[in-house]
């Protein structure tokens, strides 16, 4: 199940030629390692009109992805750098603001690399188009060098020079993160901010106590202090609707002290399931709701009847233990065992004498219906809208002409009113 990432991300125009008035438009070319994540980060800055991936600052090397990634060019000082041309409305955002975001989004102290991306194509570079841009770039760089020194980092390796020519990258590189919605954002930022006061509200400045994570089951989502579209997508598609009993905790990669983590943490999001402080399962990159709930099901339910019902469309045994517990509860709501979303109300429960929980209706908007023609039968399957797990079936033989939702008790939890 995939959602259209373009509906939730800042829009990008394909060309400034489509803009009727360009009086206030300016541009700067920036290299900060792989251009995929950088392009999306710049697009998120208010006032940025477009961000175009491309190549620049090389000579005697063809400006194409195939050529710059050749082994012979890995350490070639004349190789082109992967860069992004940032086109911005100077009446809405200053070049200084853009350059501050640029520095905060990568590690400029690394020479010809960003994390595991190694080679001259990944060098940190600012390519200016006039003397004024050059002066601003030098000023911002000097400011950031001081902040890095105070934080214990080394020399800024960013090269500032004049732009000679910008070559637009192949079409499949443009808006790459939007075209590949199930990936991750490499996060190589130092965490050093220009505005220390503004960063006090950020995750990096929060005092983190991992003691509660050392007991029981927990989910840890490693996110970026900077803009990460895959993190935002995961929050929107999964976290915002999640009310499950296993808590989701957000951390930066630097905030995992005391936890035993096996999965590499340089990508965001990285989603880790831990028990008693130790990783049980982890995955780099965005998890779709289907994938997340399948992993959560295995983590929470294990090899059980409930897992079999939820994901293999099994059926509880008649008059099972959970049915006997749930058939006469006090007033309340039955919720999805994984997502915690309300599904059925005791006001709509009735005794069908079938051996399965029966309701005349579901909570509005909580379930989806699907045709089920397996085993030579014509039935309507009921699934949870949030987690997608199998709940049971609905039949037209309820009391007084109402439907009968025949629901498996093992995939539910009960909350008293």
Image: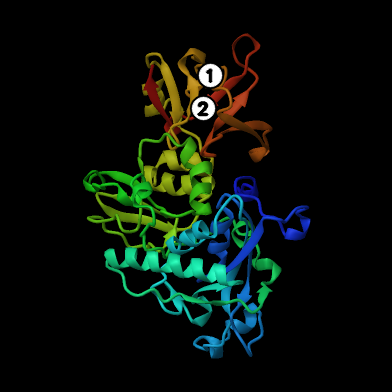
Q: Give the residue drawn at x 46%, y 16%.
A: 346
Which of the 4 image quadrants contains residue 385?
top right
SS class, disc 1:
strand
Relative depth, front residue between 142 and 332:
142
Q: Is residue 399 left or right of residue 142?
A: right
Q: Is residue 183 above or below residue 416?
A: below
SS class, disc 2:
strand
Q: Is residue 376 above or below residue 257?
A: above
User: Circle 1 sits on which residue?
Assistant: 359
Q: Is residue 171 left or right of residue 390?
A: right
User: Circle 2 sits on which residue?
Assistant: 407
Relative depth, front residue between 92 and 313:
92
Asked if the residues shown at circle 2 and circle 1 are in contact, with their CB atoms under 8 angstroms apart, the answer is yes
| Crowd band around label 2 with a 10 angstrom C-alpha radius: few (<14), some (14–19), many (20+) | many
Whether residue 30 is visible, yes or no, is no
Spatial distance from mark 2 to mark 1, Cα to Cα?
8 Å
Q: Position of residue 128 (x, y in %)?
A: 57, 72
């Amino acid at each position: 199940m995939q959602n259209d990432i373009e509906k939730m991300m800042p829009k990008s125009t394909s060309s400034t030629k489509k803009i009727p008035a360009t009086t206030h438009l300016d541009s700067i070319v920036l290299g900060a390692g792989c251009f995929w994540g950088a392009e999306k980060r710049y697009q998120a800055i208010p006032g940025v009109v477009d961000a175009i991936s491309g190549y620049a600052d090389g000579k005697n090397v063809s400006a194409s992805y195939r050529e710059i990634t050749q082994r012979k060019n890995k350490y070639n000082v004349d190789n082109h750098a992967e860069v992004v041309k940032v086109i911005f409305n100077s009446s809405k955002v200053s070049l200084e603001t853009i350059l501050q975001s640029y520095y905060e989004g990568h590690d400029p102290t690394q020479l010809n690399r960003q994390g595991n991306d190694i080679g001259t194509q990944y060098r940190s570079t600012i390519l200016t188009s006039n003397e004024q841009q050059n002066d601003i770039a030098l000023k911002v760089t000097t400011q950031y060098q001081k902040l890095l020194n105070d934080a214990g980092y080394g020399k800024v390796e960013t090269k500032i020079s004049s732009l000679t020519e910008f070559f637009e990258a192949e079409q499949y590189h443009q808006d790459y993160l939007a075209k590949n919605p199930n990936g991750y954002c490499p996060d190589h930022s130092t965490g050093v901010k220009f505005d220390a006061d503004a960063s006090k509200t950020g995750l990096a400045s929060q005092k983190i106590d991992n003691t509660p994570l050392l007991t029981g089951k927990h989910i840890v989502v490693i996110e970026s202090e900077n803009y990460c579209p895959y993190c935002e997508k995961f929050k929107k598609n999964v976290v915002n609707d999640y009310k499950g009993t296993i808590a989701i905790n957000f951390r930066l990669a630097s905030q995992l002290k005391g936890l035993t983590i096996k999965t590499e943490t340089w990508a965001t999001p990285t989603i880790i399931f831990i028990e008693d402080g130790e990783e049980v399962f982890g995955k780099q990159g965005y998890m779709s709701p289907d994938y997340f709930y399948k992993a959560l099901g295995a983590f929470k339910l294990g090899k059980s009847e409930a897992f079999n019902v939820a994901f293999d469309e099994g059926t509880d045994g008649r008059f099972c233990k959970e049915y006997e517990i749930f058939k006469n509860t006090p007033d309340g709501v039955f919720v999805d065992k994984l997502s915690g979303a309300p599904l059925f109300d005791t006001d709509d429960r009735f005794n069908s004498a079938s051996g399965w929980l029966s309701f005349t209706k579901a909570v509005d908007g909580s379930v989806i219906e699907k045709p089920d023609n397996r085993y030579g039968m014509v039935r309507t399957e009921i699934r949870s809208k949030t987690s997608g797990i199998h709940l049971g079936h609905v039949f037209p033989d309820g009391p007084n002409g109402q439907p009968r939702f025949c629901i498996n008790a093992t995939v539910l939890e009960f909350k008293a009113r």
